[in-house]
């Protein structure tokens, strides 16, 4: 019996001689298509360029949803006419941005002004595990007001979605720069 015990002990002790090697660092390999833009082909009181490989959904009240199917993301755009209520529209837009302060690590505002096209507004980059990573609002301050928000159809994990956020952020900047009012 003692010999069997020693034999089992020797097998266990001697069989664990493999060197343990740490796993090499893994890097997420994401590839995104080359960017090509086209004019929004829906009749709206505004127009701008959208990425060709997105799907644009026509929503009521001149609203839009621009979907990125491969990234499981969308830019939701709401439109409201300005009817002597610009202060209320701006306050509402900022209130929606700062609702994310509970989960956000940082909210970085950037103003946008294009007097030639009468486009004025702000873009907010929201870092951390918030529901929306980028929000913006644009207006001509007399007739038109647009609010946009970037959402991902997944539980927010900022580190994981950051490359996709940066990819879509360029499209949002292009949208803002090409925005024109029709009225």
Image (spheres, rainbow, N blue to C red):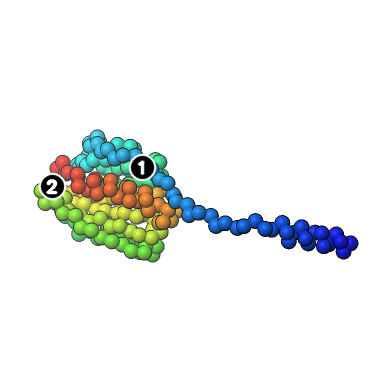
Side of 28 relative to 16 (left or right)? left
Residue beneath disc 1: 32
Q: Residue, x 39% and y 49% (percent of image)?
A: 152
The x and y percentages for residue 17 are: 67, 58
Res 58 seen here: no
Label 1 to label 2: alpha-carbon separation: 31 Å
Q: The C terminus appears in which quarter of the rendering?
A: top left
Secondary structure found at label 1: loop
Closest to the observer: 128 or 138? 128
N-term mark: 1 or 2: 1
Q: Is 133 placed left or right of 110 in the picture?
A: right
Is 46 placed left or right of 54 in the picture? left
Instruction: Indicate whether 32 appears above or below 99.
Output: above
Q: Name the quarter where the N terminus is drawn.
A: bottom right
Decide which of 72, 85 is in the foreground and name it: 72
For the point 17% across and 44% down, the residue is 180
Residue found at the far left of this picture = 116
* Quarter assignment of residue 38: top left
User: Mark 2 packing: few (<14 Cα in 10 Å), some, or many (20+)?
Assistant: few
For residue 52, what is the image quadrant?
top left
Q: Which residue is mark 2?
A: 117
> How many C-alpha atoms fall within 10 Å of the one at disc 1: few (<14), some, or many (≥20)?
few
Percent coordinates x, y for residue 89 in the rendering: 23, 56
Mark 2 residue element = loop
x then y, percent, for residue 71: 39, 44
């Amino acid at each position: 019996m003692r010999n069997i015990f020693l034999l089992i002990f020797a097998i266990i002790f001697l069989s664990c001689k493999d060197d343990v090697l740490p796993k090499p660092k893994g890097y997420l390999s994401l590839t995104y298509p080359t960017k090509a833009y086209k004019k929004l082909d829906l009749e709206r009181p505004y127009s701008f360029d959208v990425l060709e490989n997105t799907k644009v959904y026509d929503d009521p009240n001149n609203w839009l949803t621009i979907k990125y199917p491969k990234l499981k993301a969308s830019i939701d755009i709401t439109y409201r006419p300005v009817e002597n209520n610009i202060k209320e529209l701006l306050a509402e837009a900022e209130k929606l941005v700062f609702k994310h302060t509970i989960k956000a690590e940082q909210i970085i505002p950037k103003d946008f002004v294009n007097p030639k096209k009468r486009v004025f507004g702000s873009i907010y980059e929201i870092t951390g595990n918030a529901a929306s990573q980028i929000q913006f609002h644009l207006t001509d301050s007399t007739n038109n007001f647009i609010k946009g928000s970037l959402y991902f159809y997944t539980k927010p994990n900022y580190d994981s979605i950051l490359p996709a956020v940066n990819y879509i952020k360029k499209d949002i900047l292009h949208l803002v720069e090409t925005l024109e009012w029709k009225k």
